[in-house]
Amino acid sequence: MMKPGEEETRMTRKIIFIFLLIFYYAFLYAIETDKLQMCAIPGTNYQLSSTEVTQCLFEEVTGENPSANINPNYPVECVSYYDVIYFCNKLSVLMGYEPVYVIEGETDILMAYQPFYNLEIDYKIEINENADGFRIPTIKEWQYAAKGGENYKYPGSDNIDDIAIVKPYDPEESHEYEVAQKKPNGYGLYDMSGNVSEWVMDIYEEELNYTCGACFASGYGEDFEIPSLGYGTRKFSRGDIGIRLLRTNIKNITSSNLRLRTNEAKDNETICIMSKGSQIKILEFGSPETIDGISSNWVKVEVQSDAKDSDGKPIKAGTVGWCFGGYLK
């Protein structure tokens, strides 16, 4: 028989334990998503993840790590094209973005698919072009970003050993390595050649999709040059194909009063001064610059509804101009 107050004490301990558990997992999630660094690609309206998706991030989002070669900082592999769709939508929801992939009007992929079993989604996969969540790039988007605004033979260098760890292929040995160990390209993207290949959206033929980026199994030499294309069966996972994320339709708000200019750079004509909290949509990333100790890109933006200027007057929705991205949040 419990003593007076003992039941209340046990309940209090349970509540404290539950709160600590929630805080612990929230803390872990914050650490892993903080490792997801997105790089603005100048001259476009999209961002790419600076590295391939790591096993630790994939497991944090899905609760699973299907990879054959286990290391939290290796790129995730053994993921099918359909597993990637599941991961992208789940990550989008977790980070408060609108999912890109839609199946039968639903963004919850589990309504039509069980991941990690080499199964197929039997329904038409549609793309919400206006969503701001994660997806994988197209070949065109991937190859443009891989060049990094440079004219090198490989993504970031004319010397393959600068940008990838390359060994003779041995089926008994893991050739993956931790992400971001070598030099990035001009846009800050690591492992665009080497490590694993990456799924892209383009269809090769009926049951196959293209992949981009030479992988550890490709060998040494021409396979690592841009363009480096392969393909894989959508429903099957392979130990040499992983994920690189893309986001577009990115919306931000101004963190302070901010000049909207006719073009990049501070000396261009001012269209208006947007008040703090004005919502804008990024249309294109321009050249990088450091202003007031902040390094960012100039961005071409479209003013959204209800934005006001510094005098409190409405700014017409759809107004387009340039501003410094370092003052957006």
Image (cartoon, rainbow, N blue to C red):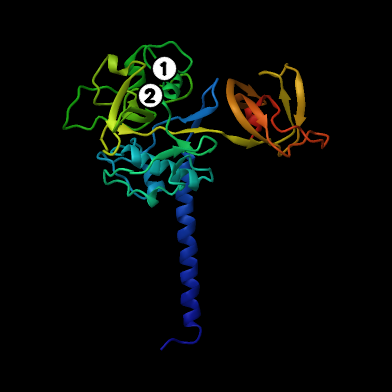
Q: Look at label 1 and name its amino acid.
A: Gly
Closer to us: 21 or 201? 201
Splitting the image into 4 quarters, where does residue 58 fall?
top left
Which residue carries the number 1 mark?
Answer: 156
Residue located 28% across and 31% down the image: 232
Residue at the extreme bottom of the image, as rendered: 1
Position of residue 84 relative to residue 232, above or below, is below
Which residue carries the number 2 mark?
Answer: 192
21 horizontally vs 84: left or right: right
Gap between marks 2 and 1 measured at Cα = 9 Å
The reply to whether discs 2 and 1 touch (Cβ–Cβ < 8 Å) is yes
Closer to us: 123 or 116? 123
Can residue 57 be seen from the camera position used here?
A: no
Q: Look at label 2 and name its amino acid.
A: Met
Foreground mark, 2 or 1? 2
Where residue 175 sits: x, y (%)?
A: 25, 29
